[in-house]
Amino acid sequence: MILVIGEALIDLIENRYQAGSFNAVVGGANANVALALARRGTKHQFLGRISNDRFGKIIRERLESNGVRLEHSIAAEELTTLAVVSLDSKGVPSYAFYVNGTADWGWTPAELPTDVDLENMHATAIQFGCLTMAMQPSSSVIEKWAREHFDQGSVTISHDINMRPALGFDPAEERVRVERLNQISHIIKASDEDIEWLYGLAKGADLDDIVHSWIGDTERIVLVTRGADGTSIYRRRSARATVPSRAINVVDTVGAGDTFCANLLGQLSDADVLGSNPFDRLENLTDADLREFVRISAVAASITCERAGCEPPTLSDLNQTLAQKHA
């Protein structure tokens, strides 16, 4: 079972064909991962702090109606976080956030699952990242909790870096935070734009040395998504491999990276790669199998890009697309 912890917020998404018109839809990177896992049929729990306000009720209705498991989520008194999403002519989103004092960042140690809770859930992995790991006080509380499980080697920890520069973070400070979180993660996913922003690099710069510094002498796996240019796979023992993207007509890219993460974790779960002694399990994963898992995850993400908003494919949707000649 995959435990996803993090934000569930409301995206106010601008209509690309009617400037100034917005639709309120459920978003948040980690909630999107849980949604994609649910649609795929993968066992999971979403651990979020969901407000009791009207937006919070909309969030619960959306997630529950899609089969997202919320038994361990918190009913929070704070207001729902809002993200205003504007889309450019290619459907690429930019964000502005209303985050001060909202529900997602109020985590306390008592709200997090204990070792016994995780054992009773049969948890094999923790997925985290994006705003939840950037916003205080939640980031420090969750980081301490995740570090304990990393040190124990009890579950696989997956970190989606997923930067949000629109919140005005300082790249140098964020780089320190991200590198610290990477050290307690077994699987790391980042976009090329995430890394370029963190390290002050020009678009298209060589990222290999940076990524290999994250890996060190471990069996850590890093995946760098590059949009239409595919996904690069990095491992200590292997040369970089890049899996090409599927050619599509993009509607927008909202939730694409979250769909990628969910489908990768789902396949790793199916293959019994997640769980205790994580680095040993990853070491036994062949390069060929990993490339195939990444290819399928990228196809799932491409399906989301063909739809408006974060609407991840079901496993049936995905298999139907994979069966097509050029998928």
Image (cartoon, rainbow, N blue to C red):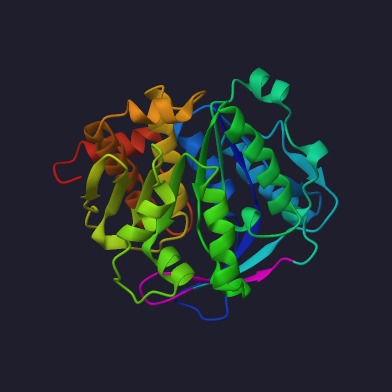
Q: Residue furthest bottom?
A: 19
Taking the magenta stretch, the answer to whether it contains residue 90 is: yes
Q: What is the magenta range? A: 87-99
Q: Locate residue 211, reporting x and y percent.
A: 37, 55
Q: Locate residue 197, reporting x and y percent.
A: 46, 71
Which residue is nearer to you in this view: 163 or 209? 209
Looking at the image, residue 308 lies above or below residue 184? below
Report the residue at 60% width, 33% height from top: 151
Report the residue at 44% width, 76% height from top: 17
Residue 249 in view here: no
Report the residue at 71% width, 61% height from top: 81
Q: Quadrant of the C terminus?
A: top left
Taking the magenta stretch, the answer to whether it contains residue 149 is: no
Which residue is nearer to you in this view: 327 or 218? 218
Q: Residue furthest right?
A: 77
Report the residue at 66% width, 56% height from top: 9
Q: Quadrant of residue 75?
A: top right
Q: Quadrant of the N terminus?
A: top right
For this view, does 127 lie left or right of residue 240? Answer: right
For this view, does 227 lie left or right of residue 152? Answer: left
For this view, does 161 lie left or right of residue 152? Answer: left
Q: Quadrant of residue 46?
A: top right
Q: Locate residue 212, reporting x and y percent.
A: 36, 52
Residue 184 in view here: yes
Q: Residue furthest front?
A: 217
